[in-house]
Image: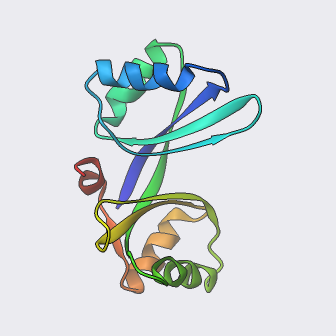
Amino acid sequence: MKVEQISIFLENKSGRLAEVTGVLAGAGVNIRALSLADTADFGILRLIVNRTDQARQVLKESGFTVAKTEVIALEVPDAPGGLARILSTLDGVGINVEYMYAFVQRSGDNAIIIFRFDELDRAIEVLLGAGVRVLKGEEVYAL
């Protein structure tokens, strides 16, 4: 039920993002989802890719600082209140959202939201118990 995500630490300067995507493209790695957060000096690029280990290897070989973390992917109705229901369920049991990012494949279908929680295993258990669909890593990598 967990999804592997890679985080790349980037200097906040022109061309660094292009370098990362170029390295991944050259290795035949496909980006499935991403989030970029920045400060004045650096950024953190979080990626879900179709081949995590290969992506980590080629990025490290290219001089990037890369870490792997586990996140979960949830299927959420693409309708008003879909996200609110998930967050309310988690708040009710005291689980904290560290960060999240989302994407929709087609409007009107379900959205996919990537979450990092302070208690990942407990969050999975609570969400499954609430009838929320938690995607397997293979499903997300194949999107």
The picture quadrant where one finds residue 44 is top right
Drawn side of residue 27 relative to residue 116, left or right: left
**Where does the image place residue 29, in percent across and percent down from the top left?**
29, 30
Q: Quadrant of the N terminus?
A: bottom left
**Where does the image place residue 54, in percent across and percent down from the top left?**
32, 27
Q: Nearer the viewer, residue 19 or 71?
A: 19
The picture quadrant where one finds residue 140 is bottom left
Q: Nearer the viewer, residue 3 or 76?
A: 76
Q: Residue furthest right?
A: 40
**Where does the image place residue 50, in percent across and percent down from the top left?**
28, 40
Q: Residue furthest front?
A: 107
Q: Residue furthest top?
A: 62
Residue appearing at x 56%, y 21% in the figure? 16
User: Looking at the image, is 76 positioned above or below residue 81?
Assistant: above
User: Looking at the image, is 2 positioned above or below residue 11?
Assistant: below
Drawn side of residue 81 relative to residue 77, left or right: right
Residue appearing at x 31%, y 64% in the figure? 135
Residue appearing at x 22%, y 49% in the figure? 142
Q: Nearer the viewer, residue 107 or 61?
A: 107
Q: Nearer the viewer, residue 39 or 74?
A: 39
Residue appearing at x 42%, y 27% in the figure? 56
Which scheme is used to colour this image of the protein? Answer: rainbow
Please give the count of numbered marks on the rendered protein: 0
**Where does the image place residue 57, in percent across and percent down from the top left?**
39, 22
User: Looking at the image, is 133 positioned above or below residue 71?
Assistant: below
Drawn side of residue 28 relative to residue 63, left or right: left
